[in-house]
Image (cartoon, helix red, strand yellow):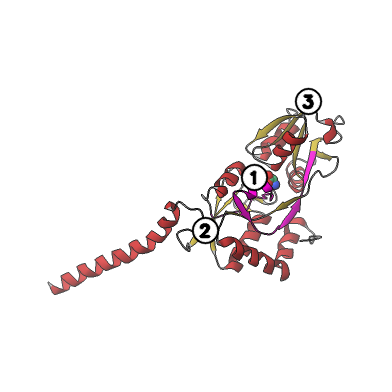
């Protein structure tokens, strides 16, 4: 009987230990304040996009999430000593979700903008992009952003390109949840042009569109990508520091070369 009692006591103790362990995760999920309010987590969720070549996309052969951002955040998290897991969703959902603290971290070719900085904390820039207009090969009507008045210009919902078109042009803007839909509309002749981040337009055109998407005019803006966190996140400084280390020790250059073929001009 004594033995039985002991066993019973032991299982109660074990159960409370397990409950306490599970509890730390739950506390994080339920917490009202964003990011890390429940203390350190075992695994942090990284929100990312699944259709933004070559930064984050699903590799057709392997079915895996791959890309420059994926390799970079994996290396940065490792350097910072933090476990991560990915969750993919539409870009506007990522921006909203990181701002509200639904995710711990986001990396999605996300441009650092003043407006986003009101609800999001970013690391230092890790990639310099910019917006470019593109049309279907053979379209000689549109030679630059000056020519889009009254034309249908496709882009992505919640992107800096959508904002640029709204603020600076008289184009008919068609915004899609995924940028690939925007490109497909241009290639199918349903939209006259697309405005998006230069590296994405180029990579998509080369790898997915037989170079049928032709960039026109000058790069319109400078856009710095940053790793994003909810405002006040304690992870930001650790990740920023880890990013600095990787820029200094050559890891960043290696990842960059792997995806873009040459070392970055500046970091
Ligand atoms: N750089 C753009 C932005 O931040 C687009 C990013 C994306 O589509 N993943 O709005």
Task: Indicate which disc, 3 or 1, sits on the residue closer to the N terminus.
Answer: 1
Residue under pointer 2: 44
For label 3, being within 8 Å of ligand 1 is answered no
x, y percent for residue 32: 45, 51
For label 2, being within 8 Å of ligand 1 is answered no
Q: Are the residues tagged 3 and 2 within 8 Å (C-beta)?
A: no
Which residue is most to the left?
1
Crowding near the residue tagged with mark 3, few <14, some 14–19, many ≥20 C-alpha atoms within 10 Å: few
Task: Indicate which disc, 3 or 2, sits on the residue closer to the N terminus.
Answer: 2
Report helix, strand or loop for mark 2: strand
What residue lies at 45% left-to-right and 59% top-to-bottom?
38
Report helix, strand or loop for mark 3: loop
Q: Quadrant of residue 238?
A: bottom right
x, y percent for residue 128: 76, 54
Where is ligand 1, by quadrant? top right
Q: Which residues are magenta?
A: 104-133
Residue under pointer 3: 150
Q: Is residue 238 at least partly visible in the picture? A: yes
x, y percent for residue 160: 70, 42
- Between 261 and 250, which is closer to the camera in this rendering? 250
In front: label 1 or label 2:
2
Question: How far separated are the C-alphas under marks 1 and 2?
Answer: 22 Å
Looking at the image, residue 149 sits to the left or right of residue 45; the answer is right
Which residue is most to the top?
150
Q: Name the quarter where the C terminus is drawn.
A: bottom right
Crowding near the residue tagged with mark 2, few <14, some 14–19, many ≥20 C-alpha atoms within 10 Å: many
What residue lies at 75% left-to-right and 38% top-to-bottom?
195
What residue lies at 84% left-to-right and 31% top-to-bottom?
147
Crowding near the residue tagged with mark 1, few <14, some 14–19, many ≥20 C-alpha atoms within 10 Å: many
């Amino acid at each position: 009987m004594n033995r039985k009692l002991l066993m019973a006591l032991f299982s109660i103790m074990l159960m409370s230990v397990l409950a306490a362990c599970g509890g730390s995760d739950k506390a994080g999920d339920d917490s009202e304040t964003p990011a890390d309010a429940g203390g350190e987590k075992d695994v942090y969720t990284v929100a990312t996009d699944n259709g933004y070549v070559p930064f984050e996309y699903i590799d057709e052969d392997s079915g895996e999430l791959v890309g420059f951002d994926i390799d970079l955040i994996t290396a940065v998290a490792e350097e910072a000593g933090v476990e991560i897991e990915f969750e993919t969703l539409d870009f506007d959902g990522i921006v909203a979700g990181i701002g509200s603290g639904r995710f711990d971290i986001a990396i999605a070719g996300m441009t650092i903008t003043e407006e986003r900085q009101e609800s999001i904390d970013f690391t230092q820039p890790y990639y310099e992009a910019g917006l470019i207009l593109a049309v279907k090969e053979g379209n000689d009507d549109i030679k630059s952003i000056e020519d889009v008045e009254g034309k249908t210009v496709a882009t992505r919902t919640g992107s800096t390109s959508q904002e640029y078109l709204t603020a600076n042009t008289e184009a008919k803007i068609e915004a899609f949840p995924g940028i690939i839909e925007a490109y497909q509309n241009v290639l199918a002749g349903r939209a006259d042009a697309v405005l998006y981040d230069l590296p994405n337009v180029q990579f998509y055109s080369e790898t997915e569109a037989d170079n049928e998407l032709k960039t026109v005019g000058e790069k319109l803006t400078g856009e710095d990508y940053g790793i994003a966190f909810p405002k006040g996140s304690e992870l930001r400084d650790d990740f920023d520091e880890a990013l600095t280390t990787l820029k200094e020790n050559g890891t960043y250059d290696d990842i960059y070369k792997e995806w873009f073929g040459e070392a970055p001009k500046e970091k």
